[in-house]
Amino acid sequence: MGGEHAEVVRLLWGPRPKPARGPRPKLDLDGIARAGIEIADSDGLAEVSMQRVAAQLGVTKMALYRYVPGKAELVALMVDAAIGPYPAARARRGGWREQLEEWARQLITVFGRHSWALDATVGPRIPGPGELSWLEHAVAALDGTGLSGAERIDAAVLLVGHVRAITQQARAAGPAGDPEAQLGAFLGDLMQAHGERFPALTGALASAAQSDGQDQAWEFGLQRILDGLAALIDKRAR
């Protein structure tokens, strides 16, 4: 593993130093991560800095650098602490579909609580043991289904993508309400003026309004992904 990632690997995966005799150290990695999470939860990831985390902990920035070498490593610690290990109480309940459905619902709750993690989990990077336990559970849930290893990983990635998309839309909507209702209102106004150019969309929106079909993107998408996996698993069984 490249030297550029060595410090992240050490902090996330290396053994945590055991406290020596004498006064208890004022800082530890868990406390540093929690301080960063508090800032990100309230003000966003862009507001997290070594200086601000140090101030939150009541220490100098130089003191913080003795534990964490920079912001990249700090954010890696924050992500793993915020996502945490997959809840053991939720593991291995029901068949593969029930397990993955519960998994996705747990994950969207985590991202909803820490939406800044969307920005911190883009592109190739080193995941921590907590985060990786989620992938482990999703892949394990599909054991014995006939899907290949690559397909089981891809299934987890597909579910994560749905979770991320819905969370991003909810974050963009802000405290004003759910994103689907806002989009429906905007489109409704546009169709009032320009509906003749988009007859299929106008009809679909009118039908959705009559059947209370708004605010279903999360549930609809989740169930269709699981239906697709069920069809593939059934095909393999035959």
Image: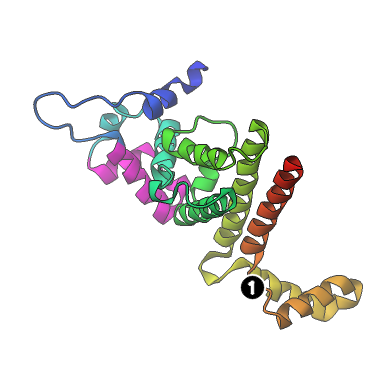
List x then y, in percent, for residue 118. Answer: 54, 47
Looking at the rendered structure, the kind of residue marked 1 is Ala
Q: Nearer the viewer, residue 90 or 237?
A: 237
Q: Nearer the viewer, residue 65 or 179?
A: 179
Q: Nearer the viewer, residue 34 or 207?
A: 207
Q: Is residue 22 visible?
A: yes
Q: Is residue 189 visible?
A: no
Q: Residue furthest front?
A: 238
* Residue occupied by mark 1: 181
List x then y, in percent, for residue 161. Answer: 63, 47
List x then y, in percent, for residue 57. Answer: 25, 43
Q: Residue furthest right?
A: 197
The residue positioned 43% from the left and 51% from the top of the image is 90
Q: Magenta part of the protein: which range?
A: 30-58
In what quadrant of the picture does the C terminus appear? Answer: top right
The residue positioned 42% from the left and 49% from the top of the image is 40
Give yes or no for residue 152 being in the magenta stretch: no
The residue positioned 15% from the left and 23% from the top of the image is 20
Q: Residue 93, relative to residue 206: is it above or below?
A: above
